[in-house]
Image: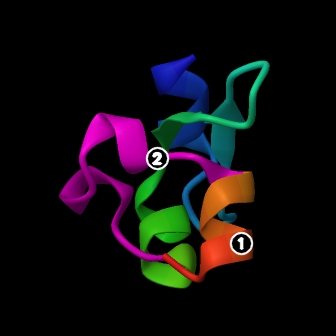
Amino acid sequence: MLELLTAMEGVPAHVWGRRTDVLAWNQTASAVFGDWAARAPQERNWAGGAVTGR
């Protein structure tokens, strides 16, 4: 999966878990949507971030 994300540079891409937890992402996704690596793992939820603005 990580190789696929790396190959997709230039296109923002995420891998989500079943509860919209962001499990992996590429550099372009970080540039567009913010640095998921800077967040604690329990704060890496796409839906929660959209609702709370995190």
Secondary structure at numbered mark 2? loop
Is 39 magenta? The answer is yes
- Residue 50, which numbered label? 1
Between 17 and 49, the one lying in front of the other is: 49
Task: Report the amino acid beneath label 1.
Answer: Ala
Secondary structure at numbered mark 1? helix
Between 3 and 40, the one lying in front of the other is: 40
Read off the magenta span: 34-46
Total tally of numbered discs in the picture: 2
Q: Height in image: 21 above or below 31?
A: above
Task: Report the amino acid beneath label 2.
Answer: Arg
Q: Height in image: 17 above or below 51?
A: above
Q: Residue at x 57, y 16 (%)?
A: 1
Dot 2 corresponds to which residue? 44
User: Residue 20 sits in which quadrant?
Assistant: top right
Give the CA distance from mark 2 to mark 1. Answer: 11 Å
